[in-house]
Image: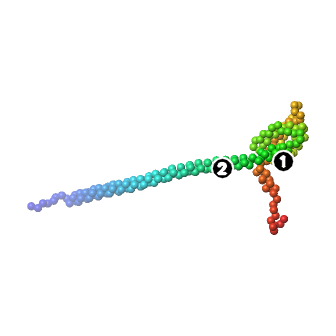
Amino acid sequence: MPRINLLPWRDQQRRDRKLAFFVALGGAALLAGLAAFIAYLLLGSMIDAQEHRNDRLRAQIKILDKQIEEINDLEAQKQKFISRMQIIEKLQRSRPEVVHLFDELVKEMPDGTYLTSVKQTGNNLKLDGVAQSSTRVSALMRSISASQWLKNPELEVVQTKTDVAGSSFVLDAQQVSLSDTDETEGANRPVRAVAGSPK
């Protein structure tokens, strides 16, 4: 006796479609998970590579920082050496100025006048002395004004004392440095006429 399937064919078709849908959904989920895993591995490798590059950059930055510190130290040492050389040059230039100063003080001192003390601060001089009269002090100031190594005399105090024969005075002046004399000589030096130029 033949078997007759009494199940409706539409229910079987619906089950087949549902099964195919779940299979496709599972495959899609599997593919999505596989794609996510591959993307995770790629991102991890990219992050590791970037971290490696960052570590190399940090190491190079540390090396450059050390080199910059060494360069800054060398610059500081260079500035110290330059300042020392300038001080030495200034001292070497000022050595003959002291000789000129005392020689000029002796030359410009008028008769009947002598100094009791000389104080120097930079180029400023304070001269304490005794003169027989105030006219001798005026003569000293005129001599300082006309001097090559002294300038700008200014009288602070003139006092007549009973214990000293004459008047004591305090006089301020300025020393002319060699650089100042070189500049004035260069400014006053005559210009030579060039051949063919109008005189």
Residue 175 in view (yes/no): no
Q: State the mark number for residue 7.
A: none
Graded by Cα atoms within 10 Å as few (under 14), some (14 to 19) or many (20 or more), the crowding at tag 1 reads some
Q: Quadrant of residue 34?
A: bottom left
What residue type is disc 1 on? Ser
Tag 1–tag 2 contact (CB < 8 Å): no
From the image, tell me which residue sits under label 2. Answer: 82
Residue that lies at the very extreme toward the bottom in this rendered image: 196
Q: Nearer the viewer, residue 1 or 191?
A: 191
- From the top left corner, tell me how far across and down residue 113 is, in percent: 87, 39
From the image, tell me which residue sits under label 1. Answer: 147
Tell me the residue at 25%/57% (across/down).
19
- From the top left corner, tell me how far across and down residue 75 is, in percent: 61, 50
Graded by Cα atoms within 10 Å as few (under 14), some (14 to 19) or many (20 or more), the crowding at tag 2 reads few
Quadrant housing the C terminus? bottom right
Tell me the residue at 12%/60% (across/down).
3
Tell me the residue at 37%/54% (across/down).
41
Tell me if 121 is positioned left or right of 80 in this view.
right
Quadrant housing the N terminus? bottom left
What residue type is disc 2 on? Ile
